Image (cartoon, helix red, strand yellow):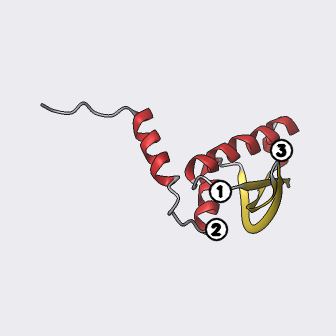
Amino acid sequence: GAIPARTEEQVMAEISARLRGRDRAMSFDQIVNWVKIFDKRILKVECDKGVMRTDNGVSRCVVVRASVREKEFFSDDEIELLGTRLGSFLKARTSINSRFQLEIAKV
């Protein structure tokens, strides 16, 4: 018996689970590349180590600064939505305990 082919959702779930493993190391270059391919309207990306306040105190995080051209968006709400979607995108591809602080600058 042959095994039925996996659906796209099953493949993405497996990839996400493997990428989120605790022992997976990631670099700022990987994060920069992921952000650049996420949306073509993102012009420039920089990453840096940072600290953020959480419900349980203070935690280390990765500060992701992305620059976008304001003219390519209809409103500030759309830019804010881009930040929300980008945060979910990064969370799905990094280890479980990774935290991101996103800063989107308009150019």
For the point 74% across and 69% down, which residue is it? 48
The amino acid type found where label 1 is placed reads Ser
Is residue 75 found left or right of 44 in the rendered image? right
Image quarter where the N terminus lies is top left
Q: Earlier in the sequence, mark 2 or mark 3?
A: 2
The extreme left residue here reads 1
The circle drawn on residue 25 is: none
Question: x, y percentage for residue 32?
Answer: 64, 62
Is residue 35 found left or right of 18 in the rendered image? right
The circle drawn on residue 98 is: 1
The extreme front residue here reads 56
- Disc 1 residue crowd, few under 14, some 14–19, many 20+, Cα 10 Å: some
The amino acid type found where label 3 is placed reads Lys
**Quadrant location of residue 46?**
bottom right
Residue under circle 3?
A: 71
Measured in 3D between alpha carbons, the distance from the residue under mark 1 to the one under mark 3, in whole angstroms, is 32 Å
For the point 40% across and 40% down, which residue is it? 11
- Disc 3 residue crowd, few under 14, some 14–19, many 20+, Cα 10 Å: few
